[in-house]
Amino acid sequence: MDAGLKRELEAKVYAGERLTREDGIALYASDDLAWLGRLAHHRRTVLNGDRVMFNVNRHLNLTNVCSASCAYCSFQRKPGEPDAYTMRIEEAVSKAKEMEDEQLTELHIVNGLHPSLPWRYYPKVLRELKAALPNVKLKCFTATEVQWFEKISGLPASEILDELMDAGLESLTGGGAEIFDWEVRQHIVDHDCHWEDWSRIHRLAHQKGMKTPATMLYGHIEEPRHRVDHVLRLRELQDETGGFAVFIPLRYQHDFHDSKDGKVRNRIQERTTMAAPAESLKTFAVSRLLFDNVPHVKNFWVMHGLSVAQLSLNFGVDDLDGSVVEYKITHDADSYGTPATMHRDDLLHLIWDAGFQPVERDTRYQVVREYEQAPSLAERRSEPQKIWA
Ligand code: SF4
């Protein structure tokens, strides 16, 4: 990037001016990672100071049986496959209750598009979970699932959301977004929920008072311009509703043969490589700079590894999800030694060690607890430390 353009972009960021599509593409074209980090860090500091939010949550996937076969997806199974499963309601409740002692604040539930489970199953699970764990917030279902519920119930999304909210739903999840541009989307997504429906359902959720997350799956067959366009669509919707609480870039993962039949389900694996850490850090930084009206940018550490999670806090990220337990969709996909579970203390140390101030939050980004200043590094190093890759 020539020095003049660099100065121009820098001036815009420091003046708090909105960046354009061309600016976003130029930022992705820059190889000056430290410079990108500095700009994004400035923006995150203006918005969130030196705080890093995190939550104590558990991910539950009620079923991996799915009618669709998205090209990048290693999670879905067809009915009758050896490791296809669907949880009974009691099973879901007992799994959720396993974490009660950790002062769990959120359950995060996403699922396959099951071909024969009736619509009634879903509000029923929510009611039972809420009855068993009344203080736990339920963040459940992608917009894709809500559109699926429309199909299987014959009800409009508005009534579906009303019933789910009545059963205890606090927020939708941000999934199903992938990359909105049809040029890419038509090759990777195998269901009918695209930008028109995805945005319709989130808009509706915002009108009903929900704060929702938005995601972007990056690092597969898309180009930087598709990432820029993806964020700009969300930014425009955010101008209209103000309902997005957080943006979550998700790193596309390969399938690492963990299924019982050894089948690789990811059909674009042969022609893709997973994004390296520098690419991830750049994506976080540019996302923070472009998506100027979303309050938070999250690193879902399971998809990036803990080292990148710590570094990303200097590249625009101010939110870490979470104390994830048993995340089935991806786990340790690139053998970084990423653990399946992080407890509250693990997260606190991860954040302190990176030089930030941890704040525990709930699903609505309300503060649950602030923590004292970090004990000095020397003090913490005086005891044997856990080793993270
Ligand atoms: S991404 Fe979701 S909808 Fe697509 S195949 Fe996987 S589970 Fe099904």
Image (cartoon, rainbow, N blue to C red):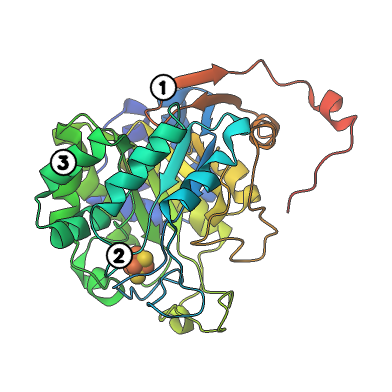
Disc 3 crowd, CA 10 A, few/some/many (<14, 14-19, 20+): many
Give the CA distance from mark 3 to mark 2: 22 Å
Give the CA distance from mark 2 to mark 1: 31 Å
Which marked residue is nearer to the observer: mark 3 or mark 2?
2
From the image, tell me which residue sits under label 1.
366
Q: Nearer the viewer, residue 38 or 83?
A: 83
Residue drawn 20% across the image and 49% down it: 233
From the image, tell me which residue sits under label 2.
113
Kindly indicate the quadrant of the structure image that contains residue 353.
Answer: top right
Could you tell me the amino acid type at mark 1? Gln
Could you tell me the amino acid type at mark 3? Arg
Could you tell me the amino acid type at mark 2? Leu
What is the x, y in percent for residue 269?
A: 47, 79
Marks 2 and 1 in Cβ contact (< 8 Å): no
Kindly indicate the quadrant of the structure image that contains residue 172.
Answer: top left
Q: Earlier in the sequence, mark 2 or mark 1?
A: 2
Residue drawn 28% across the image and 45% down it: 123
Q: Earlier in the sequence, mark 3 or mark 2?
A: 2
SS label for mark 1: loop
**Quadrant of the displayed image that contains ligand 1:** bottom left
What is the x, y in percent for residue 96?
A: 52, 43
Q: Nearer the viewer, residue 280 or 11?
A: 280
SS label for mark 2: loop
Q: Nearer the viewer, residue 223 or 84?
A: 84
Disc 1 crowd, CA 10 A, few/some/many (<14, 14-19, 20+): few
Q: Earlier in the sequence, mark 1 or mark 3?
A: 3
- Within 8 Å of ligand 1, the CB of disc 2? yes
